[in-house]
Image (cartoon, grey):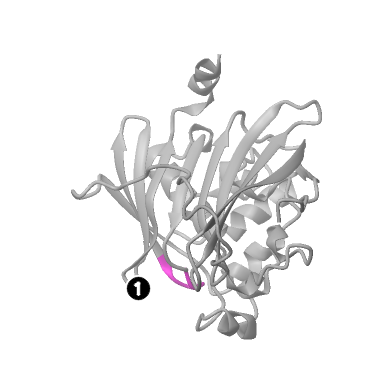
Amino acid sequence: MRGYRVPIAQDVCDPRSAILYALGVGAGLAAIDESRFLFERDLTVLPTMALVLGTPGFWPMAAELGWDWPRILHGEQSLRLHRPLQLGQVIHGRIEIGEVADKGPGKPALVRAKRILTTPTDQLIAEAEEIWVLRGEGGFGGDRSLVPLADGQCPDFPPDAVLDLPTAANQAMLYRLTGDRNPLHIDAGTAAAAGFERPILHGLATMGLVSRALIHLCCGGDASLLTRMHVRFTAPVFPGETIRTEIWRDGDDIRFRASARERGVVVIDGGSACVQGFVKEQEEVT
């Protein structure tokens, strides 16, 4: 596994791709004006689009890895932007497979991976880390756990604000056009083999939808303020469900949780985000 090199990828953040991504994470479905994410005039790129740029797609399907990919789940995801995504920007991405943990025989294996996005002149754009859950692949020996990507925990008092956002019945079909062609999200047979009653929505599509909720609840609609985000996926979303995002705010630091309203099931828990924008981010770096 450690010897496998994920192919280096290059993308262009063009208007068509930015609009397609926004549609893929549900922009335009709610009774909220989101034309700035969908109309070429004064188009704004959603910050979580960085999660689909500079990647060869669902690389865990690579035959060289030998993973039982229909049974792989997305456990955690973090994103930190160092500069805003710009239209016309060429983006280089490289992915490194990191630590592996063994939860024991018959239990999952956990794999950490990190992706770095840069400009062609090696200026850092964004860093993204993820933890994959390989169900049933434990038992090979080794460390039992990975350090979480973030120590997120939601308060035990009522949230400061709540927003419900819908997903469409064809949401996963649309989102997969951004690059992740895993059949789990469109083929009923693959979904059944993985233990799901029907195809599920991509975890990153849910994260993108929740990012929209944070932009509306915490940023006054200004997407450039959202520069960091971490989620822990706790249950799948089925296309067509309504996602309720609850937020707790402490200045620029946000805690959040998301649930499938119709089932009352938490799908993202212990989420955290920062909405301080890029000026403070650059000051922090220097």
- Quarter of the N terminus within the rendering: bottom right
- From the viewer's perspective, tell me whether residue 281 is left or right of residue 7: left
What is the x, y in percent for residue 249?
30, 38
Label 1 crowd bin: few (<14), some (14–19), many (20+), radius 10 Å: few
- Quarter of the C terminus within the rendering: top right
- From the viewer's perspective, tell me whether residue 247 is left or right of residue 238: left
217 within the magenta span: no
- From the viewer's perspective, tell me whether residue 90 is left or right of residue 36: right
Q: Residue at x 43, y 50 (%)?
A: 213
Which residue is disc 1 drawn over? 262
- From the viewer's perspective, tell me whether residue 248 is left or right of residue 120: left
Look at the picture and state if 7 lies above or below 184: above
Q: How many marks?
A: 1
Q: Residue furthest front?
A: 141
What is the x, y in percent for residue 62?
76, 63
Q: Secondary structure at mark 1?
A: loop
Residue 113 visible, this orientation: yes
Residue 26 visible, this orientation: no
Q: Residue at x 32, y 29 (%)?
A: 251
Q: Residue at x 36, y 62 (%)?
A: 259
What is the x, y in percent for residue 26?
54, 59
Look at the picture and state if 208 lies above or below 139: above
Amino acid at circle 1: Glu
Point out the stretch of residues depicted in magenta: 237-242
User: Principal SS element in the magenta part?
Assistant: loop
Q: For residue 235, what is the image quadrant? A: bottom left
Q: Residue at x 55, y 60 (%)?
A: 141
The residue closer to the viewer here, 70 or 281, is: 70
The residue closer to the viewer here, 236 or 47, is: 236
Q: Residue furthest left?
A: 157
